[in-house]
Image (cartoon, rainbow, N blue to C red):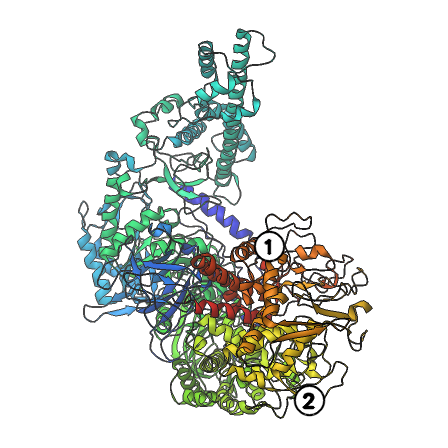
């Protein structure tokens, strides 16, 4: 049966392989495929979708990149495959230093930790950081990594402490929780113990329910260390140096001959031997069907009938380890045991049988029916119905299908095992209803489905049950057509019968569907096995070649009828009707045991989806040891014994092994050997699922197969995929988090599960394919026989001949042994010497070049392999391909090797192979040609003279024939060598923050102020152009412009590129192509006087970068740029106030963002200030604040009145920039006209006075300045040079008309109090192309009853919601979307705050005014003191703005809110819920009743709070339109030309005032603690945006639910400032203490 199964599988998958169409490799990012190959008994390799994690010591990830002078051409290949999913090493080392690794890994809320893998080396330091999703939460961190001196116990966790970025401990034993107020806190663990460890956190407020109740988690794998050599003189085998050869242990023969046979592996350069199980085998003689797990097979005895102990085996293994330096691993088989295992007789409960698992009884009965049919066919009983004993035609299968359906299924009626006895229930129903009171209910058909079949747990015929009492309740009912009780009884019973019949029919149809599917499956097997032309065309029917695959043991059924067998399965005999193990066809969940009871009625045994292994039964462990005590104890002893002898284990059939079982048993093994090397075959078709197994079980290496490649292109891809970083990969950056990894690979040119490649390819491909595998930066391996040119599958079941001994039939001249030894030694040397970078180049359809590069010495090894997947022409000559070109000098030819026949036709097909009857032999008609360590002059592959072009060397191929392999060693040219020394010193200094180079840089940067730092770090394209130096943002070909000309523009990209080692990114291509970017960065700084020293330093630093191989430029560029960037940003922090300088990274990042907006812009200066202004005097070119980038960066659009003063506190006061802020306040004050501050400043030359709110924000900013700045009150007496001292005046020169600032403020108040109607100067198309004429008419004033300031009309929009319609097509041109005329709610708050400020100044006699006065139409005077005015506002605010629950007005669609305005022309707009009222609650909290304020804020939270901003309109408002698109050219007037700018899109700056208002009123209303937590939770999105946006800022607005808005400024001043103010408020409350 096992042989039949193997033949079927091989043919099935060979058919799949043959169907594959070879073509050019086309791989999209994140999309790859590996075709499967058959194993010894069941599997198809998976479609691999992620990159491999093979690693060497110094570095880690891999990508195709450019290691030669053909940089541009090869660079395109580099972009084809980006490794985005691999680990990046963080090293506490110099770029050439020793290996001390430091890793930073984020832990996040709700992460599916099992599916993400992080692989670290032993001795690493791990820092666990919270990510932005945890902001504001109090968390406790746990791990099962044991404390120093303790042993690992998977279920035992300990609490870890947290530290600030400064290293200060912030948790204690009594208070283990950390308050996450930033992502820069960490918990550090030194990983000195191998294994996989679990870290999880819980929120403090949740009870501690252990790891199962984790709120977030991660797994970390610490790689084991393999040691070989004698005690006291052991050496380590790095994982990437592993060269493993598999031997089928049963073919080693007696133990006293093992050494001579195993020596073959040693002499071939292998350093690990993989043994199949050494235990007693079952009757099939399969290497994986074990009869007794606790006894060594007697076939290894030196004499027939003798015994062998584990200790004797251990002696051989120990000699290999200690004397040969060869480690060993051995398979452990946990899933099944041989049918003949004697211990099953005493413990049949250890299997899935008809007794232990009654749900398998239907499947067993079906299996028995198939077995009976097979027996009948073999006896010729079905020949008369068209099914002969030799089935070899499709018509036979059709006849067989008919017989199965009509004759055999009807004998077993499987469906009856799921049905009920309907008549039994009907009769019982009739009996019961006659004895019961008449019902009161009428028959209700809608309740009939409440009665469903309840499966009989014993699966007896017609034994399913129903809820009979409920059936009586439902079906014993009145029927309108029954007029006496007897007829009613019959009607009720008949209704019940029909319902039960219906349920039974449903079950029958369902089961019949499964059976139809099952028959199709079994016939597919018969078709391939006996009928198909590409199948084995088996004729005989025997136990070995049964017609149908057997799914169960049929112990004791011989000669019994199906009825008798069915009866037995309910008795003790059913204990031995055991389910076989196997491999499930199609898609199945590898994390679920397929033999367990499944949801629903179907399972793989009933549907015949299993490729069954008929020699073994599946073991049933249960969920815990108590479920099957003997089995768990038995298997534990088995695994411990294996771990005691061998250095590692190979977990056979891992994907079908229950996770909890493997977890338990491997934990037991690691107690014996803590450095256990665990290898697994795992085919889940998913990297994420692979990671579950790797994380849970601590799998070190997953087996990957080179034979899955269908051509050389795919072969090269696999080599690249399974390990290493790309050549020129980026150096680690401690400020960047680890990227997740994929599992380490054990990459084999041939596994013992697969046929010889000679059967699929050609014998001439064995050498080049082995060579390509040897160049992979991961563990590699092979199967015994490959190197000896064995041309057939050495079968794990059928093969009984033994291996040959070293010196007796096999030696260094056999097959490709000599070349394999050279390749193996080269593989080990590359790993041990740190050649961790990989590049693969497809030179020709059949020629692949692989480069391994050392990032420390910059030496390279390049191997070129001419594959021969198909047989070449017998007399094939050299293949003409391009020359091998590389940067550097040739040191030596490491090897040249080829394989040819010993005849005049070097590539002739092999003669028919003759097997030796006693030993496993290979081809002897081939000859290996091998040269090692030779100069170019002795080469037979290359032209003996190299062509040298500068630093480049070119080798011309003259004799590269099929099957040829050549490897060379290359060193850096002497010219670049000095440059590498300088670069490595420089980058080391920058990383450590010490040394001569760093000190010089630090001295330069320490002299820079924030204005200069803006130029160094930021400056967008328009700002750069505005300087007039001819500069602009750097344009990267095939990518576009960087967002900033300064360092941030490049660092934003590098932080994305570097962790993924995305060397195919256009930025990297540009760096490889030339020095333009390097020169640009240094040269542009020279345009700034203050930055000239930095420019000079950079030019010197970059000079050696220009002299190294181009493919290495990106990694050094990143190291330099990132290092300088860190120095610059540290200087920014040093210039900040303590709140920022000593604050968290969130605060510092926001403060850094404020620099983006503050620069000296030539086209947007302040108006000339008075010469008499108090010191310090302003510079000629003052710093101005850009409203947002890139749209509002220069010219008249840069400086907006309201934007400037809304952002002023957050961007300038909190960052300590008071002098510059002072100039801005005075500069805008100089332009006061009509009692207003201009909307657009335009340097004071053409200010536009079309906003009513800017003046109030301006005066409110003066209040904040006076309260915050050192000697802030002095600004009140600063000289303000009025440009327009009278409303109709032309602009005055600086100093021509000076006033004190408080006089200007008084004028603004006085004008409003008096009231003013005016028309904008130059009204018309010149200043506004869309506004209608009435819109240019403005009106401002103060309501005499309420004191509320008011203004505007229905044709203009004088607040920040200032969108003017512009679409003639849609009919909204000249129509403001949000006029907000009348009294806008935020202006009342600002007005009140300003008046109270003025009141305080007057009372303190700091100003000569006490109030305002006005004249009426008849000359009457009205005087209000500031206090009276403010009191009037206070007394009327809640009354006129708050919409209480009792409001009865028809316009009040929302209650318990604050109106958006009062007295608007369109009165319904007053009642709209918008995001403006929290401004008033923040700037003037005393205006509001605290409870009313809190209710309104709760409404805002419910309706208008978004992820990043506030909705500008209630979503329930009919005018709500969430998505802003300024290019919309539709006829919809509500959205055309972006008319809905403020009618739903979510603006970011208002959320700052909302959050601040909630903090204020939470404190007043007793909700502070929960509101602080809520505030931090909301800020998570802002932190994430800040960390990921290329602009490193916060946007102007987003569309619906935080979605991207293409027309938004990507970074906006008031957005950043508002959030920084929130952090300041949290700081003031002490809520930012970790």
Up the image or down, 455 lies above or below 1311; here it is above
Comparing 15 with 832, the one in front is 832
Query: Quick one: label 1, few (<14), some, or many (20+) residues within 10 Å?
Result: many
Q: Quadrant of residue 273?
A: bottom left
Element type where label 1 sits in the image? strand
Question: Which residue occupies 65% across, 74% down?
Answer: 1412
Instruction: Give the label on residue 1297, or none.
Output: 2
Disc 1 versus disc 2: distance between alpha carbons? 46 Å
Answer above or below: position of 1478 versus 662: below
Q: Where is residue 1297 drawn, in percent x and y?
A: 69, 89
Residue 16 visible in this rendered orientation of the protein: yes
* Residue 562 percent coordinates (x, y): 40, 23
Q: What element carries label 2?
A: loop
**Which mark is in front, 1 or 2?**
2
Quadrant occupied by the C terminus? bottom left
Label 1 vs 2, first from the N-terminus: 2
User: Is residue 1613 at all visible to an observer of this figure?
Assistant: no
Tell me if 1538 is positioned left or right of 401 in this view.
right
- The residue indicated by pointer 1 is 1457
Residue 820 placed where, x, y %? 37, 67
Q: Nearer the viewer, residue 1188 or 802?
A: 1188
Q: Which of 698 and 1543 is in front in this view?
A: 1543
Answer left or right for 169 relative to 1041: left
């Amino acid at each position: 049966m096992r042989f039949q199964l193997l033949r079927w599988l091989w043919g099935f998958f060979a058919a799949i392989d043959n169907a594959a169409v070879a073509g050019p490799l086309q791989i999209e990012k994140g999309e790859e495929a590996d075709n499967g190959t058959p194993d010894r008994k069941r599997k198809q390799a998976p479609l691999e979708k992620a990159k491999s994690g093979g690693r060497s010591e110094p570095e880690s990830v891999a990508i195709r990149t450019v290691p030669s002078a053909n940089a541009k051409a090869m660079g395109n290949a580099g972009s084809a495959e980006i490794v985005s999913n691999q680990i990046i090493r963080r090293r506490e080392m110099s770029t050439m230093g020793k290996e001390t690794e430091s890793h930073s890994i984020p832990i996040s809320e709700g992460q599916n930790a099992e599916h993400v893998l992080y692989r670290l080396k032993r001795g690493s330091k791990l820092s666990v950081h919270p990510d932005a999703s945890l902001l504001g939460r109090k968390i406790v961190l746990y791990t099962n990594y044991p404390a120093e001196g303790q042993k690992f116990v998977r279920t035992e966790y300990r609490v870890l402490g947290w530290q600030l970025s400064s290293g200060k401990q912030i948790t204690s034993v009594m208070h283990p929780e950390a308050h996450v107020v930033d992502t820069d806190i960490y918990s550090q663990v030194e990983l000195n113990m191998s294994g996989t460890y679990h870290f999880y956190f819980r929120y403090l407020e949740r009870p501690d329910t252990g790891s199962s109740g984790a709120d977030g988690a991660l797994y970390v794998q610490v790689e084991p260390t393999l040691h070989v050599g004698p005690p006291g003189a052991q050496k380590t085998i790095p994982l990437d140096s592993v060269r493993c050869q598999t031997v089928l242990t049963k073919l080693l023969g007696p133990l006293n001959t093992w050494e001579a046979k195993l020596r073959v592996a040693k002499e071939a350069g292998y350093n690990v031997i993989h043994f199949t199980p050494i235990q007693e085998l079952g009757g099939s003689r399969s290497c994986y069907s074990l009869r007794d797990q606790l006894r060594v097979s007697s076939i290894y005895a030196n004499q027939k009938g003798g015994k062998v102990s584990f200790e004797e085996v251990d002696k051989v293994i120990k000699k290999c380890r200690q004397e040969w330096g060869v480690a060993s691993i051995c398979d452990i088989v946990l899933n099944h045991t041989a049918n003949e295992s004697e211990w099953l007789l005493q413990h049949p409960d250890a299997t899935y049988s008809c007794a232990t698992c009654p749900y398998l009884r239907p499947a067993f009965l079906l299996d028995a029916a198939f077995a009976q049919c097979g027996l009948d066919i073999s006896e010729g009983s079905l020949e008369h119905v068209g099914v002969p004993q030799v089935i070899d035609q499709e018509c036979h299968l059709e006849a067989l299908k008919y017989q199965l359906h009509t004759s055999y299924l009807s004998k077993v009626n499987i469906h009856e095992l799921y049905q009920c006895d309907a008549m039994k229930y009907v009769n019982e129903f009739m009996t019961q209803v006659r004895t019961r009171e008449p019902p009161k209910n009428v028959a209700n058909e809608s309740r009939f489905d409440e009665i469903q079949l309840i499966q009989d747990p014993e699966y007896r015929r017609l034994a399913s049950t129903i809820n009979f009492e409920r059936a009586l309740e439902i079906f014993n009912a009145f029927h309108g057509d029954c007029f006496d009780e007897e007829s009613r009884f019959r009607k009720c019973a008949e209704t019940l019968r029909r319902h039960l019949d219906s349920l039974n029919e449903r079950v029958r149809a369902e089961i019949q569907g499964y059976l139809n599917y099952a028959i199709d499956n079994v016939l597919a097997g018969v078709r391939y096995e006996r009928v198909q032309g590409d199948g084995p065309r088996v004729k005989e029917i025997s136990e070995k070649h049964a017609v149908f695959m057997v799914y169960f043991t049929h112990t004791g059924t011989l000669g019994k009828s199906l009825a008798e067998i069915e009866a037995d399965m309910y008795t003790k005999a059913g204990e031995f009707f055991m389910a076989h193990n196997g491999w499930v066809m199609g898609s199945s969940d590898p994390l679920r045991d397929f033999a367990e009871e499944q949801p629903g009625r179907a399972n793989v045994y009933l549907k015949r989806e299993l490729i069954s292994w008929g020699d073994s039964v599946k073991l049933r462990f249960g969920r815990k040891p108590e479920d099957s005590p003997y089995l768990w104890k038995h298997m534990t002893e088995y695994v411990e014994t294996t771990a005691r002898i061998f250095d590692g284990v190979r977990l056979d059939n891992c994907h079908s092994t229950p996770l909890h079982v493997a977890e338990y048993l491997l934990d037991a093994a690691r107690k014996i050997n803590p450095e256990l090397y665990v290898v697994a075959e795992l085919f889940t078709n998913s990297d994420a699922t692979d990671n579950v197994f790797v994380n849970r079980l601590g799998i070190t290496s997953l087996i990957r197969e080179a034979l899955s490649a269908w051509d050389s292109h795919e072969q090269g891809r696999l080599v690249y995929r399974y390990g290493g970083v790309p050549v020129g990969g980026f150096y680690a950056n401690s400020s960047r988090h680890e990227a997740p990894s994929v599992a380490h690979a054990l990459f084999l040119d041939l596994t013992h599960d697969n046929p010889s490649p000679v059967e699929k390819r050609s014998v001439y491909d064995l050498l080049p394919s082995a060579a390509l595998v040897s160049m992979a930066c991961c563990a590699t391996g092979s199967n015994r026989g490959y190197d000896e040119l064995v041309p057939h599958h050495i079968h794990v079941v059928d093969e009984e001949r033994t291996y040959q001994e070293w010196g007796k039939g096999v030696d260094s001249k056999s097959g490709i042994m000599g070349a394999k030894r050279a390749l193996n030694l080269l593989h080990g040397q590359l790993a041990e010497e740190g050649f961790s970078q990989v590049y693969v180049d497809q030179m020709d359809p059949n020629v692949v070049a692989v480069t391994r590069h050392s990032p420390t010495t910059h030496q390279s090894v390049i191997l070129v392999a001419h594959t021969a997947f198909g047989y070449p022409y017998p007399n094939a000559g050299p293949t003409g391909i391009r020359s091998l070109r590389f940067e550097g000098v040739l040191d030596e030819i490491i090897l040249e090797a080829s394989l040819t026949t010993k005849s005049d036709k070097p590539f002739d097909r092999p003669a028919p192979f003759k097997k030796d009857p006693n030993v496993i032999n290979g081809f002897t008609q081939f000859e290996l040609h091998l040269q090692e360590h030779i100069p170019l002059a002795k080469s037979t592959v290359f032209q003996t003279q190299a062509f040298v072009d500068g630093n480049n060397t070119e080798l011309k191929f003259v004799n590269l024939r099929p099957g040829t392999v050549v490897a060379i060693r290359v060193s850096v040219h002497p010219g670049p060598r000095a440059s590498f020394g300088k670069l490595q010193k420089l980058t080391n200094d920058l990383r450590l923050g010490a040394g001569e180079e760093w000190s010089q840089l630090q001295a330069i940067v320490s002299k820079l102020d924030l204005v200069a730092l803006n130029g160094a770090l930021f400056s967008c394209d328009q700002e750069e152009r505005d300087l007039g130096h001819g500069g602009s943002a750097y344009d990267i070909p095939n990518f576009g412009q960087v967002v900033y000309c300064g360092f941030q523009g490049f660092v934003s990209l590098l932080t994305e590129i570097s962790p993924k080692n995305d060397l195919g990114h256009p930025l990297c291509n540009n760096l490889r192509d030339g020095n333009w970017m390097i020169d640009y960065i240094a040269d542009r700084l020279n345009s700034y006087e203050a930055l000239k020293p930095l420019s000079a330093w950079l030019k010197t630093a970059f000079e050696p970068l220009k002299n190294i191989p181009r493919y290495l430029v990106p990694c050094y560029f990143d190291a330099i740029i990132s290092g300088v960037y860190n120095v610059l940003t540290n200087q920014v922090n040093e210039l900040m106030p303590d709140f920022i300088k000593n604050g968290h990274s969130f605060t510092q990042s926001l403060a850094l963002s404020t620099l983006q907006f503050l620069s000296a812009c030539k086209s947007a200066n302040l108006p000339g200030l008075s010469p008499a202004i108090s010191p310090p005097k302003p510079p000629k070119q003052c710093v101005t604040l850009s409203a947002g980038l890139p749209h509002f960066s220069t010219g008249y659009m840069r400086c907006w009145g309201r934007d400037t003063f809304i952002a002023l506190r957050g961007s300038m006061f909190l960052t300590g920039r008071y002098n510059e802020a002072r100039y801005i306040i005075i500069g805008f004050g100089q332009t006061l006209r009509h009692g207003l501050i201009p909307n657009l400043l335009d340097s004071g030359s053409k200010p536009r006075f079309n906003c009513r709110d800017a003046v109030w924000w301006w005066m409110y900013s003066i209040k904040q300045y006076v309260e915050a700045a050192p000697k802030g009150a002095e600004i009140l007496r600063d000289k303000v040079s009025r440009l327009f001292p009278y409303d109709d005046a032309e602009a005055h020169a600086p100093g021509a008309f000076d006033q004190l600032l408080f006089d200007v403020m008084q004028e603004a108040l006085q004008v409003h109090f008096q009231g003013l109607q005016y028309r904008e100067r130059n009204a018309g198309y010149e200043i506004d192309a869309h506004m209608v004429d009435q819109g240019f008419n403005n009106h401002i004033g103060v309501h005499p009853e309420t004191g509320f300031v008011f203004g505007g009309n229905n044709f203009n929009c004088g607040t920040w919601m200032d969108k003017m319609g512009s679409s003639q097509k849609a009919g909204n041109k000249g129509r403001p979307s949000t006029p907000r005329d009348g009294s806008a709610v935020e202006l009342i708050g600002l007005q009140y705050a300003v008046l109270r400020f003025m009141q305080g100044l007057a009372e303190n006699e700091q100003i000569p005014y006490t109030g305002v006065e006005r004249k009426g139409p008849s000359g009457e005077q009205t005087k209000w003191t500031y206090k009276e005015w403010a009191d009037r506002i206070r007394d009327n605010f809640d009354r006129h703005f708050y919409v209480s629950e009792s409001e009865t007005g028809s316009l009040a669609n929302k209650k318990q809110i604050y109106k958006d305005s009062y007295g608007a022309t369109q009165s319904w707009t007053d009642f709209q819920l918008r995001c403006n009222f929290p401004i008033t609650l923040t700037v003037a909290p005393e205006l509001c009743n605290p409870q009313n304020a809190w209710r309104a804020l709760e409404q805002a939270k419910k309706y208008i709070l978004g992820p990043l901003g506030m909705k500008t309109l209630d979503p329930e408002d009919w005018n709500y339109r969430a998505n802003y698109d300024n290019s919309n050219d539709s006829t919809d007037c509500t959205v055309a030309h972006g008319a809905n700018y403020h009618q739903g899109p979510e603006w970011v700056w208002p959320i700052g005032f909302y959050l601040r208002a909630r903090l204020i009123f939470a404190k007043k209303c007793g909700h502070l603690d929960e509101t602080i937590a809520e505030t931090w939770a909301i800020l998570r999105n802002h932190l994430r945006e800040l960390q990921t946006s290329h602009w490193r800022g916060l946007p102007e607005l987003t569309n619906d639910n935080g979605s991207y808005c293409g027309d938004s400024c990507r970074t906006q001043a008031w957005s950043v400032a508002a959030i920084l103010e929130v952090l300041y408020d949290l700081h003031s409350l002490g809520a930012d203490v970790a």
